[in-house]
Image (tube, grey):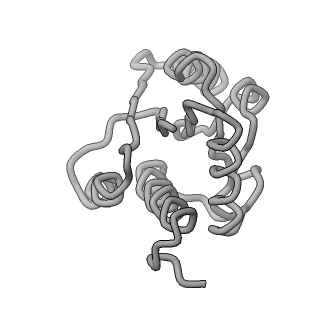
Amino acid sequence: MQVHLIAVGRAKAGAQRALFEHFNARISPSIRLREVEEKRPLAAAELMRREALLLLQAAPVGAYLIALDERGKTLSSPSFAERLGELVDGGRRDIAFIIGGAHGLDESVRRAAGLCLSFGAQTWPHMLVRGLLAEQVYRAQCILSGHPYHRA
């Protein structure tokens, strides 16, 4: 299984990018990051629609889409690992996590996703969410393989 991260914005050097890279280096195969960006100044609603188009176009054809959205479902780490394991066992070749921009995700992305996932009710910086996601994917791999990284 190949995990993809399709995200709005370009990560700059710093602690948030380093966190993503730290955990991504532990994941096998590592997460393929694809960054998209709309550079034209647009009203919020139009910007969200344009970002949605860019995000969905960047996802591999046939990938199972997981939208990261504050209105999504919260899962414990073992439940998240179980869900990823089910996708792998079900023959999914590609899983694409989608992170929107500053205004969030357009409804079209949430509708296209097989799962809307939330890291809690709080709002997190989008660049930090990349690192949180990489850690949870790494943790899921450890849970599924019986590695002691996850201690419940």
Q: Residue at x 64, y 51 (%)?
A: 85
Q: Position of residue 14 (x, y in %)?
A: 23, 55
Position above or below: 14 against 67: below
Q: Count of labels shown? A: 0
In front here: 76 or 121? 76
- Quadrant of the image for the C terminus? bottom right
Q: Residue at x 60, y 59 (%)?
A: 123
Q: Residue at x 63, y 33 (%)?
A: 92
Q: Position of residue 111 (x, y in %)?
A: 79, 28
In front here: 44 or 134? 134
Position above or below: 28 against 39: below
The residue most toward the bottom is: 152
When asked about the image quadrant of residue 115, the answer is top right
Q: Position of residue 94 (x, y in %)?
A: 55, 31
Q: Position of residue 72 (x, y in %)?
A: 75, 50
In front here: 53 or 21? 21
Side (left or right) of 31 relative to 139:
left
Position above or below: 10 against 68: above
The residue most toward the left is: 13
Q: Residue at x 36, y 44 (%)?
A: 30
